[in-house]
Amino acid sequence: MNTTELSARVNGALVRPGDAGWDQARLFHSGIGEPDLIVRAAAVEDVRAAVAYAAAHDLPIGVRGGGHSAWGTVPGVS
């Protein structure tokens, strides 16, 4: 997956499989599929960019907010 365009649009970190810290970053993972990419949003604009990127590339998304919440798919988004 080419994430160069997304990387240029977010201030937070993109964590990809094989990156240092990948295993730690995906610890929140619920076991429903395997994430392809994790966006650690630093601002609302990062969330917007990540959702727009996923929509443009027909990618499913999962959202986790806060330090204690579980993640799940967003209703209405495949």
Image (cartoon, grey):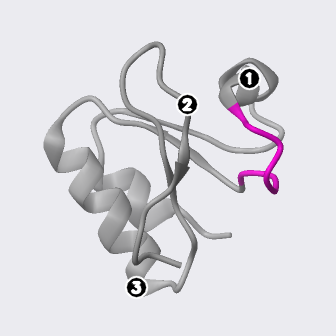
Task: Kindly report the distance in space between the C-alpha atoms of the residues bearing marks 3 and 2.
Answer: 26 Å
Q: Main secondary structure of the magenta part?
A: loop
Task: Using residue 36 as the reference point, say whether residue 46 is left or right of it.
Answer: left
Q: Out of 56 and 76, give the one closest to the viewer.
A: 76
| Quarter of the image where one finds residue 19 | top right
The part of the chain drawn in magenta is 29-35
Task: Kindly report the distance in space between the C-alpha atoms of the residues bearing marks 1 and 3.
Answer: 27 Å
Q: Secondary structure at mark 1?
A: helix
Residue 47 rendering spot, x and y as whole percentages: 28, 49
73 drawn magenta: no
- In this rendering, the answer to whether 41 lies above or below 78 is above
Q: Secondary structure at mark 3?
A: helix
Q: Which residue is mark 2?
A: 70
Q: Which residue is mark 3?
A: 56
Q: Which residue is mark 1?
A: 27
Q: Residue at x 39, y 71 (%)?
A: 53
Of tags 1 and 3, the one toward the viewer is 1
Task: Using residue 38 as the reference point, say whether residue 12 is left or right of it.
Answer: left
